[in-house]
Image: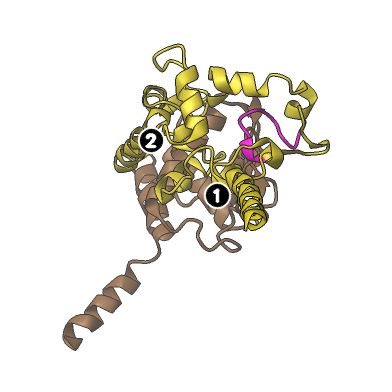
Chain colours: A brown, B yellow
């Protein structure tokens, strides 16, 4: 039993966290298009997060409209006033821990703010920005 | 003996009226997936607030859910659709509001906004716009802003408290 357990622990440790794997997958996708791509950029991510666009509902919004400017604080949904818990994974430990959730919200929120889905590069940049907060 | 009897009757009627206000108008939400997925963006409306045809129609267009992308993973879509279907207004006739909403419908489920159902419109008719459109309410979709017991499925008049204006009495 012990002989099985130790390799299992080592294997699980070497796999890294959900978000690290997620970013690696995104990076591999970007590299397919641009072989000399180096890394995601927090500054570009911030630009994606804070810049305003005419969203799906025809109103000018940014990601900050619902998540706020300070990602360590909760904010209100721009349209419904529902409280949204902090987006920063440093403040809110539940953030960026489940692939399914990351997939869902990136898809929805790019559609809502940008009226289209995000590219792998945009997703990687914006996730890097969120992680830095 | 007679006076005791009358006394008991009086007390029990008092208790009954007190009890009445604690009875939910619609069945409270009891599905954690529904609360997590739908309640992430807005008040988790009780399924008993709309008939099943309306829920069905709403769920058929989550790509543009009142203008927002509310798409779900397939397994969650199936589970939530089923929950809504099984607890829709006409399946919950024991609850006063569900009964009234279901019976007020004049179509077969083309209305997908709870605020557009005839019963809802009737109940909210006399409320000044400034109460509803103010920043801390935003709109009729925000039940909990004024109905302090909305989460329990209780929408009684005595539990209404309009932000910045106070109790509602019509």
Quadrant in the picture for residue A16: bottom left
Q: In this view, does A3 lie to the left or right of B12?
A: left
Q: Which of marks 1 and 2 is in front?
A: 2
**Closest to the observer, B105 or B10:** B10
Main SS type for the magenta part? loop
- Which residue is at a point 16% across and 85% down the rendered structure image? A1
Residue at the extreme top of the image, as rendered: B106
Residue at the extreme bottom of the image, as rendered: A2
- Chain for numbered disc 2: B
- x and y percent of residue B132 in the render? 73, 28
- Which residue is at a point 64% across and 58% down the rendered structure image? B4
- Which residue is at a point 61% across and 50% down the rendered structure image? B9
Q: In this view, does B24 lie to the left or right of A29?
A: right
- Residue identifier under label 2: B84
- x and y percent of residue A6 in the render? 24, 83
**Closest to the observer, B105 or A28:** B105
- x and y percent of residue A120 in the render? 42, 41
Quadrant the N terminus of chain B occupies: bottom right
Is B65 rendered above or below residue B74? above
- Which residue is at a point 67% across and 28% down the rendered structure image? B139
Whether residue B109 can be seen here: yes
Quadrant in the picture for residue B153: top right
Q: Does the magenta stretch include residue A128?
A: no
- Residue identifier under label 1: A41
Quadrant in the picture for residue B145: top right
The span picked out in magenta is: B134-144
Q: Decide: marks 1, 2 in contact (CB < 8 A)?
A: no
Q: Are marks 1 and 2 on the same chain?
A: no
- Chain for numbered disc 1: A
Whether residue A46 can be seen here: no
């Amino acid at each position: 039993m012990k002989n099985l357990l130790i390799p299992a622990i080592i294997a699980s440790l070497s796999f890294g966290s959900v978000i690290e794997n997620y970013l690696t997958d995104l990076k591999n996708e970007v590299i397919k298009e641009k072989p000399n791509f180096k890394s995601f950029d927090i500054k570009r991510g911030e630009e994606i997060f804070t810049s305003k666009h005419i969203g799906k509902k025809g109103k000018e919004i940014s990601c900050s409209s619902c998540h706020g400017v300070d990602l360590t604080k909760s904010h209100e949904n721009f349209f419904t006033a529902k409280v949204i818990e902090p987006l920063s994974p440093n403040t809110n430990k539940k953030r960026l821990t489940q692939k399914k959730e990351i997939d869902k919200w990136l898809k929805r929120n790019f559609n809502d703010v940008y009226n289209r889905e995000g590219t792998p590069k945009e997703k990687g940049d914006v996730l890097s920005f969120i992680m830095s907060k | 003996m007679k006076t005791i009897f009358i006394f008991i009757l009086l007390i029990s009627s008092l208790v009954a009226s007190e009890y009445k206000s604690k009875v939910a108008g619609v069945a409270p939400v009891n599905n954690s997936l529904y609360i997590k997925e739908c309640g992430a963006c807005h008040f988790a409306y009780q399924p008993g607030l709309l008939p099943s045809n309306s829920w069905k129609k709403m769920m058929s267009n989550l790509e543009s859910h009142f203008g927002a992308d509310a798409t779900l993973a397939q397994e969650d879509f199936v589970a939530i659709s089923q929950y809504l279907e099984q607890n829709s207004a006409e399946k919950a006739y024991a609850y006063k509001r569900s009964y009234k909403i279901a019976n007020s419908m004049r179509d077969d489920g083309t209305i997908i906004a709870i605020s557009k159902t005839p019963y809802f419109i009737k109940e909210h008719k006399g409320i000044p716009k400034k109460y509803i459109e103010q920043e801390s309410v935003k709109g009729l979709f925000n039940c909990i802003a004024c109905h302090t017991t909305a989460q329990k499925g209780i929408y009684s008049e005595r539990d209404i408290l309009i932000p910045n204006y106070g109790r509602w009495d019509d």
